[in-house]
Image (spheres, helix red, strand yellow):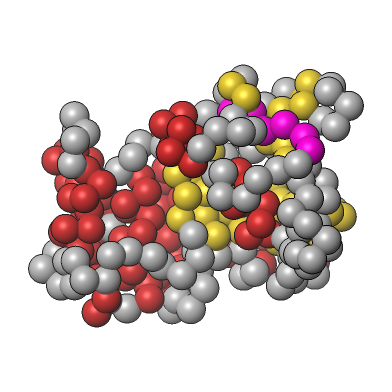
């Protein structure tokens, strides 16, 4: 899944994801303009301080924030005005900040709710349990009783059951112990190496973001102020 876009003058930007939006002057986190390239099988990290507009950018990508200017296209299809459910149908999956799941349901039920109705539902659940083996021992436990790291793994697994072409992650390492952060990073790397999946993540953990990403963007006050190739060597430039 490649996100291709047009800029504010209507010029086509191949292999790019573009959003130009204003959510209102009363919103301090509005995004004025951001042009971000997301490869079909790689990871892009968006970083910045609190209030820079990072989450607003992601919410615009999945249709939870309306844009007033610019164009959002995915694989050549204009989804600027599309409902979130339509964007999911195109292959976009979103894991919001906060390790969200159905707390009153068990781990198994949380996975099954997403898998129900899918041709490969049973197979996909099995694949997720292989990808996140820690969840196998927690299938009968209510999600509300899981640790932050376990809930995050569950949230990512639920998103992947939809077989997305682009996975959007908002602060996936927030409040999670280092060992689980390493597991999530490895999972992201493995998924993108398979091909056919692009990952757009927002992250304040600079080390994790640059290690996982092939390219990074820094957002300040709703605008991209710098960008570059990912990797640990870029950490000094970002800081």
Vertical side of 89 occupied by 29: above or below: below
Q: Pick whichever, 92 or 192, lies toward us.
A: 92
Q: Nearer the viewer, residue 84 or 208?
A: 84
Q: Which residues are magenta?
A: 69-74
Residue drawn at (64%, 37%), measured in percent from left and top? Answer: 38
Q: Position of residue 42 (x, y in %)?
A: 57, 40
Residue 157 shown left or right of residue 211 in the figure: left
Examine the structure image and report whether residue 72 is included in the region drawn in magenta.
yes
110 above or below 149? above
Q: How many marks?
A: 0
Q: Nearer the viewer, residue 145 or 26?
A: 26
- Residue at the image position 79 percent from the left and 38 percent from the top: 69
Rendering coords of residue 129 (x, y %): 21, 53
Quarter of the image for the C terminus: give it.
bottom right
The residue drawn where x is 49% and y is 41% is: 84
- Asked which quadrant contains residue 79, the reply is top right
Q: Is residue 137 left or right of residue 28?
A: left
x and y percent of residue 202 in the render? 61, 58
Q: Is residue 87 visible?
A: yes
Point out residue 201 in the picture as x, y percentages from the top left corner. 58, 54
Q: Residue at x 73, y 37 (%)?
A: 18
Q: Main secondary structure of the magenta part?
A: loop
Q: Is residue 196 above or below residue 202?
A: above
Query: Would you say residue 234 is visible in this rendering?
Result: no
Q: Nearer the viewer, residue 82 or 48?
A: 82
Q: Tell me if residue 213 is in the magenta stretch.
A: no
């Amino acid at each position: 899944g490649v996100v291709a876009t047009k800029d504010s003058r209507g010029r086509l930007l191949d292999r790019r994801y573009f959003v130009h939006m204003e959510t209102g002057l009363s919103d301090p986190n509005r995004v004025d303009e951001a042009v971000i390239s997301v490869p079909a099988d790689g990871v892009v990290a968006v970083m910045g301080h609190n209030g820079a507009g990072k989450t607003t950018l992601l919410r615009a990508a999945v249709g939870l924030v309306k844009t007033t200017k610019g164009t959002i296209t995915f694989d050549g299809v204009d989804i600027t005005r599309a409902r979130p459910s339509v964007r999911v149908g195109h292959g976009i999956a979103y894991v919001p900040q906060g390790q969200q799941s159905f707390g009153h349901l068990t781990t198994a039920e949380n996975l099954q709710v997403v898998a129900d109705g899918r041709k490969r539902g049973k197979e996909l659940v099995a694949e997720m349990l292989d990808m996140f083996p820690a969840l196998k021992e927690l299938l009968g436990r209510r999600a509300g009783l899981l640790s932050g790291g376990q809930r995050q793994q569950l949230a990512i697994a639920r998103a992947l059951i939809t077989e997305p072409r682009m996975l959007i992650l908002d602060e996936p390492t927030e409040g999670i112990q280092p060992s689980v952060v390493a597991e999530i990073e490895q999972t992201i790397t493995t998924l993108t190496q398979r091909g056919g999946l692009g990952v757009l993540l927002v992250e304040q953990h600079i080390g994790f973001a640059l290690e996982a990403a092939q390219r990074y963007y820094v957002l300040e006050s709703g605008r991209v102020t710098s960008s570059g190739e990912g990797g640990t060597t870029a950490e000094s430039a970002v800081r």
